[in-house]
Image: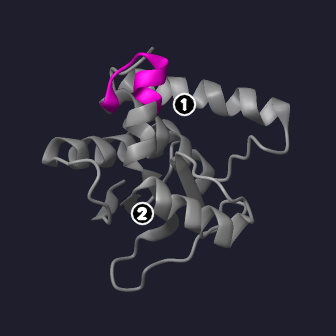
């Protein structure tokens, strides 16, 4: 199992270092491993600012406010299209507001790295089909899976 994670830094508010890029890739890979995803996977991660994510949130969900992360899964019920040139399953897109993540890290009293990794893991689980919005049971299951991955990354609470 290999994860091809393409990261697009589309903002100027937060400096995205090579270490942050590596952390995002590790979080994607750890999620796939913990979820026992078989096969290679392709994920696109766009790092944006609050204004950009607010616009995307409004365009796609009709919600006119910024948020920390948005997920755009390409698969359904565990079925994903394959990139014919690489053979990798195309899981979808993650849109992460670095500005929002840093603000939340301060609010929750933990590191920027932990918040960025957590948001990446959270979004990856959405790409893999988890949905905490429509079911409280699914929310608690998703939380357990998030904590399992964060533990593998040595970034538990």
Is residue 42 visible to us here? no
* Mark number displayed over residue 43: 2
Magenta residues: mostly which secondary structure? helix
Q: Report if residue 110 lies within the magenta region.
A: yes
Towards the viewer: 30 or 98: 98
| Label number found at residue 67 | none
User: For this rendering, which residue is in front, 143 or 111?
Assistant: 111
Badge 2: few (under 14), some or many (20 or more) residues near its Cα, within 10 Å? many
Quick one: label 1 or label 2, which is nearer the N terminus? 2
Colour scheme in use: one colour
Q: Position of residue 82 (x, y in %)?
A: 49, 77
Residue 103 image position (x, y, % from top left): 43, 33
The residue positioned 39% from the left and 76% from the top of the image is 87
The tally of labels here is 2
Residues at marks 1 and 2 touching, judged by CB atoms closer than 8 Å: no
Mark 1 burial class by Cα count in 10 Å: few <14, some 14-19, many 20+: many
Q: From the viewer's perspective, is residue 109 above or below residue 123?
A: above
How far from the left and from the top, in percent, is residue 115? 41, 32
Q: Is residue 86 left or right of residue 145?
A: left
Q: Is residue 82 visible?
A: yes
Real-space CA distance between mark 1 and mark 2, rounded to the nearest whole angstrom:
18 Å
Circle 2 SS class: strand
Mark 1: secondary structure: helix
Provide the residue designation for mark 1. Answer: 146
- Region rendered in magenta: 104-112
Q: Quadrant of the C terminus?
A: top left
Q: Which residue is pictured at 57% across the width and 48% down the height? A: 67
Name the residue: 30% across, 49% down: 25
**Above or below: residue 63 compared with residue 16:** below
Q: Which quadrant of the structure image shows residue 77?
A: bottom right
């Amino acid at each position: 199992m290999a994860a091809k994670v393409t990261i697009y830094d589309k903002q100027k508010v937060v400096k995205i270092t090579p270490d942050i890029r590596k952390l995002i890739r590790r979080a994607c890979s750890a999620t796939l491993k913990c979820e026992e995803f078989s096969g290679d996977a392709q994920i696109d991660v766009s790092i944006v600012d609050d204004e950009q994510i607010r616009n995307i949130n409004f365009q796609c969900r009709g919600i006119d406010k910024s948020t920390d992360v948005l997920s755009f899964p390409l698969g359904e019920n565990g079925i994903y299209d394959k990139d014919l040139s690489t053979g990798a399953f195309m899981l979808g897109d993650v849109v992460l507001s670095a500005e929002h993540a840093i603000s939340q890290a301060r609010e929750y009293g933990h590191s920027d790295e932990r918040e960025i990794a957590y948001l990446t893991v959270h979004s990856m689980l959405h790409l893999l089909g988890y949905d905490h919005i429509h079911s409280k049971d699914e929310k608690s299951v998703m939380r357990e899976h998030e904590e399992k991955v964060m533990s593998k990354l040595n970034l538990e609470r």
